[in-house]
Amino acid sequence: MREITRGDLLDLRKRLRARVLCESTRRKGDGLPTVNKVMAAVKTIFREAYFREDLPANPADGVGDISYEEGGPDIFTLGELRGMFGGPDPGTLAYRVFKTAAWTGMRCGEILGGGVGQLSDGIFSVDHAWKHHKAEETGDPKWGKKRLIALAPTIRTDLERWIGERSSGLIFAYEDGRRLHAGWWRESFKALLKSSQIAIGARHLTPHSLRHSLNTHLLEAGVDPLRVQVYLWGTKVEAGHAGIQRQGITKTQSLYTHFQAAMTEPVAKAIEGLLGAQTAERVSAM
């Protein structure tokens, strides 16, 4: 059991998926719920073995459901992210908005509703989000999960510079102070991809791809999956919510574990290493 790796579990999920695809040609349904139930049972076994300290690490961390992974957007490579956000600031609003998304993994409503007062001493409080693209109203972030995240040095410096001397108001808004709408979010993203000369082809790239990309590259870099979960999703667990399994902790453990902003500092450091590499190379070469 100690020799089983995350790759082995991904291969198992792939084989199960191929099997149900074959079966689905002979009967109604694609069998995805069955595959996910099997994988959930497998992940439970490894999670319990890890918490009993029978295993030094949990190879099931980061192995998600098929329906979610295959139905979601594609991701950007590190080279593409560095190409878009590793150079000098062109001074455009779109660049600043989507660089923040790429470096923090925050969702559309969290960024467009982000206020100046949410940033303090390098910690960003994700405590609300826009709930409707036509109404001037805010509410809790998705699933009610508020969180405090440490910012990587580069994006912290950028945000502080963009905020300037303002003491209140939105971080990103139109010139007259009105909040940016969902249509601006979508259209500006398309323009950013075009100006960055990223060949889309058959790839399904959306603004949410930035969040998926950050999650994927952090896990590939070996960052503790639980810290990544805290950084991107928060820690609030509803009774019976699947988030308990995604966080890799039991409901009882969630009650006794106190997640603080300091827990996300290693994630911020990893983000700086991943996305700030090109900038660092340019500075050292000057």
Image: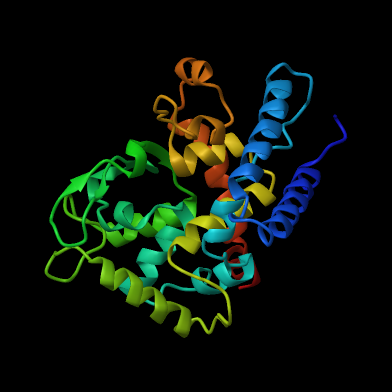
Look at the image and tell me in which quarter the C terminus lies. bottom right
Residue beneath the point at 69% across and 44% down: 222
- Examine the rendering and report whether any part of residue 20 can be seen: yes
Find residue 257 and report its horizontal and vertical position in percent.
49, 19
Vertical arrangement, residue 174 with respect to residue 10, above or below = below
Residue beneath the point at 40% across and 30% down: 236
**Snapshot quadrant of residue 198:** bottom right
In the displayed structure image, the side of residue 2 where residue 251 appears, left or right: left
- Examine the rendering and report whether any part of residue 63 can be seen: no
Find residue 207 and report its horizontal and vertical position in percent.
43, 66
Residue beneath the point at 68% across and 37% down: 38
Look at the image and tell me in which quarter the N terminus lies. top right
- Which residue is at the far right? 3
Find residue 25 and report its horizontal and vertical position in percent.
68, 62
In the displayed structure image, the side of residue 56 where residue 184 appears, left or right: left
In the displayed structure image, the side of residue 135 where residue 233 appears, left or right: right
In the displayed structure image, the side of residue 225 where residue 105 appears, left or right: left
